[in-house]
Every structure is written in C-alpha cells, then in structure tokens.
Image: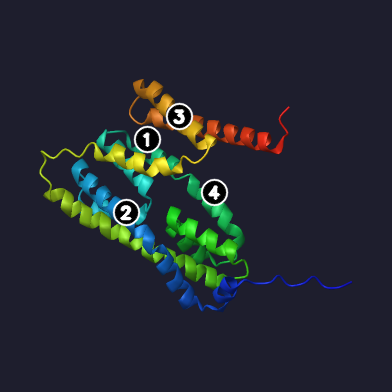
Amino acid sequence: MTPEAEPVLSPEQKRALARTPAQCLRHGVIQSLPFLLVLVPFGLLFGVLSAESGLDLAQVMGFSVLVLAGASQFTAVQLLTDHAPTVIVIVSALAVNLRMAMYSASLVPWLGDAGPRQRALTAYLLIDQTYALSIQQFERNPRLRLDQRLAYFLGTAICACVPWVIASAVGFRLGRAIPESWALDFALPITFLAMVAPMLRSAAHIAAAGVSIVASLVFTVLPSGLGILLAAPLAMATGAWVEKRTERLKAGGLK
C-alpha cells in the first residue's frame, strides 16, 4: 500500500511557511492597512458622537479600550442618548456582538491549541477585520505553525485595534470643538446604514434586515431599547429560516 502523496504547495504557501513569527506579524500589519480607510473615520465619528451625547474623555477611552467593538459601541451610545436603562444598553450591545461567538468557534481549529493567555488576548482583539483577514490566511495556508498564526493575528490587531482607540480620542476632542448648533443627530443612523448595507449580500440577509425594520417599528410603543431586543431574535430566526430554505432549494431536496 503506497503512502498518500504530500499535497503540492503553491509558491504563496511556500513563502508563508518560510516566514518567521516576526515576519508573519509584519505581514498581518501590512494586510490590515486598507482597513484604516474605514476604521479611522468611524473611530473619529464615534468620538464625536460620544462627546455630543455627554460622555467625558475617560468614559470614551474606557469604552473603546474595554469594548473594542464599533457596532456595539454605536448602539450603546445611541441608547444612552435616548436615556435607556443600563440593563437594556448592556444587553443590546451584547446582542449586536453575538457574531463574535461564531467567529471564535471557527477559529478554534486554528488557534485552539494556544495557551490560556494567548487565547484570552485573541478573544479580546477579535473584531470583524482581524477575523476576516486571519481566517482567510489560515485557510489558504493550513500548514502554518501555531506561532505563525498567532503572530499574523496579532499583526492584524495592531493595525486595526490601536488606530480605533486613538481615533476615538481624537474624535472626542473634535466633537468638543464643534458648536452645539451643529446638530449631529443624523450622523448615527447614516453610520449604521453605511455599516449594514454592504452586509446585505443574500436573500437571508435581506429578509433578516426587513424583519428587523418592521419589528422595530411595531415595537416602538415599548420602553426604550426593548423593541430592539425583541426585533433582533425575530430577524435572526427569519434569516436562518431563509438560508436553510435556500440551501434546500439549491440541493434539490425541497418537495
């Protein structure tokens, strides 16, 4: 019985395997640079809106450093501006970040053997950008060592997370300098539209978005923030149902 042949590596895979951890970290930084075109403006906007909502610099910095998640930070600031109860603010922010649990699960095969401190740091630095780049890199180069994977992930985080925190502080300073007559209430809805629109890539996404809009409008009679908590699971359930139905149709299994 002949042994199974080793898979042929592409030139790109050979270069990736030959990199030292330091080179992997630098590679992660370089590949993250285009995200600065989005992260820096959104970080500035978060700082400006936080100043407009009445937060001080320490609160803004604590928000960005501890939470480190743009969508949930914008959600929390909007609810705080609407004087929603603290419990509603926390639960809503957590609901927005539920996707991080799915990100974590998909990274387990690649980073699950790391030590407790390394896993904790990875969990803290896990955002949309670091996940998207890392999972692509790991799947394209499945033979990378654990230290190479961790170094690459850290490189993406350095370029994506640090500028976000700095931009939040700069945005806060800019926000304090903006006259009160320049109402910025319109900026937050526009920001969410800019973040959500590129995600509507399939029928399941569109169905979930449609249900969330309708449910949020229906539940506007409820106390501040509660309607969002009810609309979110309805939207997720709708999206999951549409996705499963679409998959069955593609497989020809629907009778």
Position in image of residue 175 (x %, y %): 17, 49
Residue assigned mark 3: 210
* Label whose residue precedes the other's in the sequence (1 or 4): 1
Position in image of residue 97 (x %, y %): 44, 45
Q: Which quadrant of the figure has residue 179?
A: top left
Give, as a three-letter code, the residue at label 3.
Answer: Gly
Marks 2/3: CA–CA distance: 30 Å
Position in image of residue 27 (x %, y %): 45, 71
Pick the front one: 77 or 145: 145
Q: Which quadrant of the figure has residue 189?
A: top left
Local SS, label 4: helix
Residue drawn 50% across the image and 29% down it? 234
Density class for disc 1 (Cα within 10 Å; few <14, some 14-19, many ≥20) is: some
Pick the front one: 100 or 214: 214
* Label whose residue precedes the other's in the sequence (1 or 2): 2
- Pick the quarter of the image with the C terminus: top right
Give, as a three-letter code, the residue at label 4.
Answer: Met
| Relative horizontal placement of residue 192, taking residue 150 as reference (left or right) | left
Q: Which of marks 4 and 3 is in front?
A: 3
Residue assigned mark 2: 64
Point out which mark residue 102 bears. 4
Q: Which of marks 1 and 3 is in front?
A: 3
| Relative horizontal placement of residue 69, taking residue 233 as reference (left or right) | left
Query: Is disc 1 in contact with disc 4, using a CB cutoff of under 8 Å?
Result: no
Give, as a three-letter code, the residue at label 2.
Answer: Ser
| Relative horizontal placement of residue 251, taking residue 219 as reference (left or right) | right
* Label whose residue precedes the other's in the sequence (2 or 3): 2
Point out which mark residue 88 bears. 1
